[in-house]
Amino acid sequence: MPVFNREQTLRQAIESVLGQTLSDFELLVVDDGSSDGSRALARSFYDARVRVECNSRNIGQTPTRNRGVELARGRYIAMLDSDDFARPRRLERQVAFLESHPAHAEVGSWVCLQDDRTGRTRTKRHPTESREIEAWLPWRSPISHTSVMIRGEALRQARYDESYVQCQDYDLHIRLSRDAEVGNLPEVLTVKRVHDGQVTRRSDVGDQFKMRAIGRLLEEVGVTPEPSDLERHYQLVRNPQDEEGMGVEWAAAWLDGLRTANAASQRLPEPEFSVVVAQVWLQLCWKICRHNPARLIRELCSTSLAPYYPSAVGAGVRALAR
């Protein structure tokens, strides 16, 4: 649990770990030079399982995570951000999964998002199967890092890339997926607070690091994108623009090129990757062409993705029903 100035939320985070149904663990709190009462609060827990380590100065999120990885003594390493909290059976359920699934390097879970301003909550339901998770990695990270448990050996070998000031978890998930399976449990095991103090909500720096991780993965697939192509690719599932008709034309060629490259490199699983590509294409066509039915039909019939439409629609329906 890396900590930097989280005095207001740290107690609940620590208590949620101490209240786990699985009791054989150490809670390693790494304070990154906090200037509030976080350090004293962490040390106030008189429980032999709580271990507090402190950086002499603020060194940043990614080096702090790596320091925690170096100091952790467990067979498995679970992550929990200091402004979130875990449900009681989290460790028990994830240890049981990794014990029975030796091919998996890590497992996350669904997450409850709790808005601190409104008090509203919603469940973030990630895909659970490794092949579907991997197929989505070129667009987003379908694993909430505050919910993950990773095999200690795998994490110590991979470590976090310290050139990533943010989104180091996204890069890590991509690298772990190269040689092992990754997964999510289909249940809420972590509650993630949504608030204005989060780093990724204060700037667009996070988007730049996400695109960097995506660009590296696309190169593994066999595509070296120009900066403008990478930006368009990133926006395909976020805020696609028609650009006077060129957006859809570009996307059709781009997505076809990704499928061709992946067929050669086999970096991402098939047919799952083609199904995800079809989902992206269907969503794009609907967003841009829904008010022009003739154009919508024309665009949907213009690519080689038609055989994957039934599976893509089915996957979309299942995602909504999760």
Image: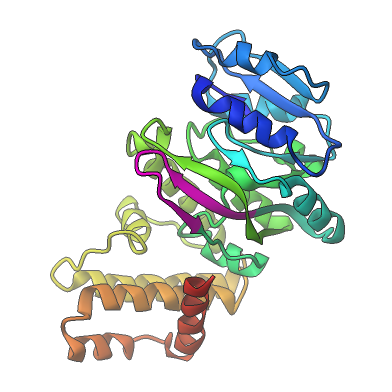
**Above or below for 259 versus 236:** below
Give residue 281's position: percent from left, percent from top.
Answer: 37, 76
Where residue 149 appears, as percent x and y from the top left, is 71, 46
The image shows residue 126, relative to residue 200, as above or below, that is below
Up/down of 171 relative to 59, above or below: below
Question: Is the stretch drawn in magenta largely helix, strand or loop?
Answer: strand
User: How far across and down, in percent of the image, does residue 80 sit?
Assistant: 63, 37
User: Which corner quadrant holds the N terminus?
Assistant: top right
Residue plotted at (45% across, 59% down)? 139
* Snapshot colouring: rainbow
Whether residue 242 sits left or right of residue 58 in the image: it is: left
Q: How many marks?
A: 0
Q: Is residue 305 toward the left or the right of residue 2 in the image?
A: left
Residue 172 seen: no
Task: Give the magenta-colored segment's residue range.
Answer: 109-123
Q: Residue drawn at (60%, 39%), measured in percent from left and top? A: 85
Residue placed at 67% from the left, 56% from the top?
Answer: 178
Pick whichever, 262 or 34, lies toward us: 34
Name above or below for residue 258 compared with residue 315: above
Q: Is residue 291 magenta?
A: no
Find residue 183 and report its image quarter: bottom right
**Residue 192 visible (yes or no):** yes
Task: Name the residue furthest left.
Answer: 244
Figure quadrant of the C terminus: bottom right
Residue 107 position by quadrant: bottom right
Where residue 42 sits: x, y (%)? 65, 18
Along the viewing direction, whichever of 35 and 276 lies nearer the viewer: 35
Residue 159 left/right relative to 268? right
The residue sitting at 44% across, 78% down in the picture is: 278
